[in-house]
Image (cartoon, rainbow, N blue to C red):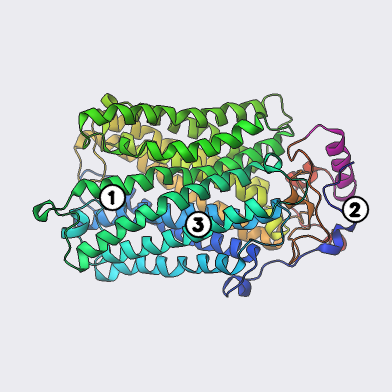
Amino acid sequence: MASVVSLPVGELRKSDGKPIMLRDVLGWSVDHKVIGVQYALIALFFFIIGGSLAMLIRWELLTPALDLMANGAAYNTLFSIHGTVMIFLWVIPMSAAFGNYVVPLQLGAKDMAFPWLNAFAFWLIPPAGVLMLMGWFVGPAEAGWTSYPPLSTMFSPDGQTLWAISIHLLGLSSILGAINFIVTIANMRPEGMGWFQMPLFCWAILATSIIIVMATPFLAGGLTLLILDRVAGTAFFNPAEGGDVLLWQNVFWFYSHPAVYIMVLPAFGILSDVLSVHARKPIFGYRMIALSSIAIAVVGFTVWAHHMFTALAPQFRIPFMITSMIIAVPTGIKVFSWLGTIWGGKIRWTSAMLFGLGFLSMFVIGGISGVMLGSVPFDLHVHDTYFVVSHLHFVLYGGSVFGLYAGIYHWYPKVTGRMLDERMGKWHFALTYIGFFFTFFPMHMAGLAGMPRRIAVYAPEFQTWNVVISIASFVLGVSTFVLLYNMVWALRNGKVAGPNPWRALTLEWATSSPPPATNFVGDPVPFKDPYGYGTKEAAAYVEAVEARYGTPDDVAQSSKPAPAETAGD
């Protein structure tokens, strides 16, 4: 039998690592595991900030009049900082958290290729976040997360400059991290792990990193021109002095549409691991899922102008409509492969699996509305309405965030050595699913009826929709605190996980929970098929692990701490 590790299962106890402490994450560390936790904690912090701003937005929109905000500019600030924080300081850093912690473990590596660079990339994020929030003291950005000129160059307060510098730093952090991931995945796989023996999460991070390295420098260039227009008197985006407003739109969306996949591809990788493990079934269409990630990375650079259909010359609309339809093909391949994976599987209804299935249902809705918006006549009709807001959130919350939640429930035991409580997890899922659906699905109807986005004062006939949406959004906001409480509670009270509570076959589960400083004792030996559930080798391995640590049902259904005498196991 090809063992997952070179050590017998019974010897895993000797390689137990120490939990990551608060003092570890507050200081400089080159350990990829500590850096992964640092990314996660700062992302969760900004998630609370961005979510709080969303609650203020929905509070304001309970009535058609301007009630909560002093004026329209204050409301503009709310959605500008909300959108920016949720994208650049929550979803992208949280995806990087999983990448930093999990990828080296899945590759059987001791660390990332460039540990110091890895730490430096993280420590660019706190000052960037501080700069973003400091805008509140000098007049915060109010030109939207897209920051179109001339609003962002001529009419916004000084906080708009801090906004641009902050995004610059965050982009640099992403580029450095992406280079590290590419080198690590290309050069640090163990013997016996070819490209098509890698876990699909590694493929997803590789595709994401390729997009970051290719696209983010364009955003950096645009931001540099924006800053120069604001502080040095240049006129790159001022038509009155020979500039071009559409230059910013082209540069911004050349980054920002691929950036949708920067946020979604890591969730795709998480979903592939979660569905296969918790359905106890080999992944369906492994190679097609892997190659479709690379296809998305390539084709994603050909669709940026569908965000500009209303500003684009008519003869250029059709080519971008065609590429917008084509990009749905590799994503559709993934969806059908995931459905094939769970079809006939022995599904364990864990919280991770529930969020994985929730991802599937919500992301498909977002994908369908995306194809609709890729059609020129339809897009011209609903442009800048709440239909677009609904589509965006079904992709980035119903997709990315649901996937990140699945990853939290799946890998939290590996990071902390403790299981999250499944009862709280299911409450979290129910509140999130219901709150999310009734927040954003009604926006389709409001948008089709003509309600414009980014306004605080709206026509009275839209109030009923907005009351429903706002009440549901408050439920969604409460759901987040169920997760946060569960994460804190489980640190001390959760059941001890053992090295492999899910009986998974990828290498991160072939070491203790949490892993030791060097990740593995001895050299890990990967399975030929990391998703080969049902093979004799996998059955023998699972039998050995369960004999030592109990069955998955014992782990998934119990929230009680292990007895003191068995806590070490």
Q: Amino acid at mark 2?
A: Pro
Asked if marks 2 and 3 touch (Cβ < 8 Å), the reply is no
Q: Amino acid at mark 3?
A: Pro
In the rendered image, the quadrant that contains the C terminus is bottom right
Numbered circles on residues, count: 3
Distance from disc 3 to disc 1, alpha carbons, whole Å, reads: 29 Å
**Label 2 sits on residue:** 8
**Label 3 sits on residue:** 93
Distance from disc 2 to disc 1, alpha carbons, whole Å, reads: 60 Å
Q: Secondary structure at mark 3?
A: helix
Residue visible at 54% across and 38% down? Answer: 293
Residue nearest the viewer, comparing 490 with 302: 302
* Range covered by the magenta-colored residues: 533-550
**Label 1 sits on residue:** 60
Quadrant in the picture for residue 229: bottom left
Distance from disc 2 to disc 3, alpha carbons, whole Å, reads: 36 Å
Q: Position of residue 489 (x, y in %)?
A: 64, 59
